[in-house]
Image: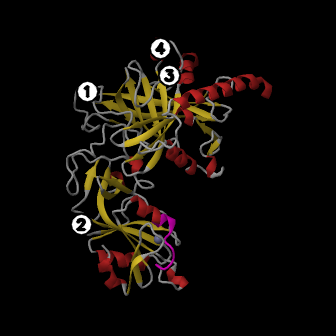
Amino acid sequence: MQTKFLKPFLAKVLFAMLAFFILSCEKESIDTSEPNKSFSLDEAMLYHKLNLPDQNPPQDYKKGILEQKGSLKHTVLWYLATYSATEAYSYYEVPIVFSEIKTPLITTEPKASDFTVIKPILSSSLHRMIIYKDKDGRISRRLVTYVPDIEYLERSKRPDISHNSLKKMDKDFDGYLVYKDWEENTDFILFINKGKPTRKIVPKNSGNSESESIGRITDGNRSPHQKNSQTTYCIQYYEESWVRYCTVRPDEPPTDESCGPWELENTEMIDEVCIDGETTDPCLDPENVGSGDCGSGGSGSGSGSGTGGSTNFYYDPAMVYNSVGDKPIHEFQNKCTGLQFMWNNYTNNEVNGYITSAGNLIVTDILPYSGGAVHGLYEFDGIVYYTWPSSNGQPTVQHPDLIVSGPNYFIPVVASIHTHTPCRNDGTNGVSHSVSSDDKNLASTYPGLNLWVIGCGAIAQYGTGNNFFNVQNGDLSILCNSIQ
Ligand SMILES: [Zn+2]
């Protein structure tokens, strides 16, 4: 078995080494430090390495090694990474090879495709990882599969489509791009016609709006549910999941010899997508791996002042802290009432909440006794919001600062507060030990938030340092006034 692979394997190693040396000469490619870029390849590699189950010592992160993803092995072809920067991100697009290659075929027929017809499509499909860093320095990653149309493959007369990238697609490229998160949930699909994105599908089970009743096709600012135009028509889409298993070797692309046959794993109904008149969305952007929509607005000039600026408020679900929030568990218009409620009613849990810009208190996380990570924060234009899908329900008290945008509610928050419950039993005041890594992580992500802890007969603030500061002793019914 092994000897059969040996010759092509050696040839490929030689080829890879040659490619490596050629690329190395071109100065841009694998110089991982790249001081002129706001996001170095080195940083991207380290992020990827650190966000995998820990199976190799981190110092191996620059080597082409086999890494696990769940039960799958994978290798990232870092020497082929390309860099790009947009208004919203700096990112690397890099080929990734899994031991189980999954190519989603989007069809409009429920029955399995004719394999002889689709085989060239499956063989030419591309799998890339996008590692991107936003303006606030947060790094995240996506998987993108390029699926070419057969017409494009026939026109271009070659099966290799790897010269296409999110930044620059063939003027002639027809097909679609399937964007998935690292857990391989489909976030959205962009259809590409002659190198330009034309339509977007958001499967109903993707992202955070579980109860959305139909798949959404974006069409400028119009509601996807508006069906009163007589040109509206609806298409039922299906996703066929084709799979094959490959032997993965460090730094090597898969080949037909290293892979088994393609098999249809399952066919899933995605959604009925209704198109209101136009078939082309004027505002789609393949480089926006967060949503596929156009530009971030953001940065430039415009609504710099104050809260809201809801005209170009921009929401990127990929940039929510941990995961999208849930509807607040409790809401109070009197913060002191709320803070005492948090402390008095959960003697066996760490409780987390926020003071909103209007001075209300929302309770958002009931965590284990020893604490945990919070979720649902989102920063835009220097303002931190707590956000949750409107399908989870509307707020129960008046929030004058509430923003409704897209599928979510957003409330600007100015302070985060959580309880340190163990001090009820360990005899400390709850703010004398070292600041936890979850807490430091929050502090480094949102330096503009005031971060407070309620301990036993004491409150205190924390930041990215090891020690709590501004420790105040007394009864919470008085101290609560200091928390803002
Ligand atoms: Zn804490």
SS at circle 1: loop
Q: Which residue is mark 3?
A: 161
Q: CA distance from mark 1 to mark 3?
A: 32 Å
Residue annotated with mark 4 = 156
Q: What separation in Å lies between label 2 and label 4 (alpha carbons)? A: 59 Å
Amino acid beneath label 1: Gly
**Residue 356 placement: quadrant:** bottom left
**Residue 371 at x, y = what percent?**
50, 69
Q: How many marks?
A: 4
For mark 2, what is the residue? Answer: 358
Residue drawn 54% across the image and 29% down it: 25
Height in image: 115 above or below 477? Answer: above
- Main SS of residues in magenta: loop
Q: Earlier in the sequence, mark 3 or mark 2?
A: 3
Earlier-in-chain disc, 3 versus 4: 4
What percent of the width, then of the height, locates residue 3? 79, 25
The spot of residue 165 in percent (x, y) is 44, 29
Q: Amino acid at mark 3?
A: Ile
In this rendering, which labeled residue sits more in front, label 2 or label 4?
4
Residue nearer the viewer, 168 or 339: 168
Q: Is residue 483 left or right of residue 116?
A: left
Give the residue type that dot 2 points to.
Ala
Q: What amino acid is at disc 4?
A: Ser
Q: Which residue is mark 1?
A: 277
- Residue range highlighted in magenta: 431-439
